[in-house]
Image: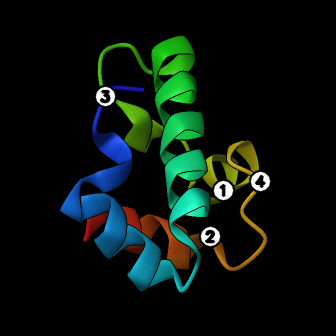
Amino acid sequence: MKRGTPEHPKVHALAALLNRPKYAAVGILESLWHFAQEYAQAGDIGRYSDDAIARWVCWDDASTVLVDALVE
């Protein structure tokens, strides 16, 4: 993770949108970056379904909630 990421305003916004603590937002982003590095190096993560992305980051709510918040 890039230094300073946990304090970035976008991380705080993601935590608020998901109604989760900041540490959860940081973990989601870190997991998502690892997923993208391994399986979407061209930046084409959208070729995976919302459900697949949610499962990868261990999201336990509706996958659309997660993806909508990430897009926001």
Q: Nearer the viewer, mark 4 or mark 1?
A: 4
Residue at which label 2 appears: 63
Q: Amino acid at mark 4?
A: Cys
Q: Which amino acid lies under the numbered mark 1 shown in the image of this protein?
A: Ala
* SS at mark 3 in the image: loop
Q: Quadrant of residue 72?
A: bottom left
Task: Tell me, for residue 46, which label it has, or none.
Answer: none
Q: Which residue is mark 4?
A: 58
Cβ atoms at labels 2 and 1 below 8 Å apart: yes
Q: Is residue 1 above or below residue 10?
A: above
Q: Is residue 8 above or below residue 60?
A: above
The residue tagged with tag 2: helix, strand or loop?
helix
> Left or right of 40: which side holds 42?
left
Q: Residues within 10 Å of mark 3 (few under 14, many from 20)?
A: few
* Residue 36, horizontal then vertical, whole percent: 47, 25
Secondary structure of the residue carrying tag 1 is: helix
- Residue 14 is situated, as x and y percent measured from the top left of the image, at 38, 69
Q: CA distance from mark 3 to mark 4?
A: 24 Å
In percent of the image, x 46 and y 65: which residue is there?
67
Mark 1 or mark 2, which is nearer the start of the sequence?
Answer: 1
Which amino acid type is shown beneath numbered disc 2?
Ser
Q: Which residue is tagged 3?
A: 3
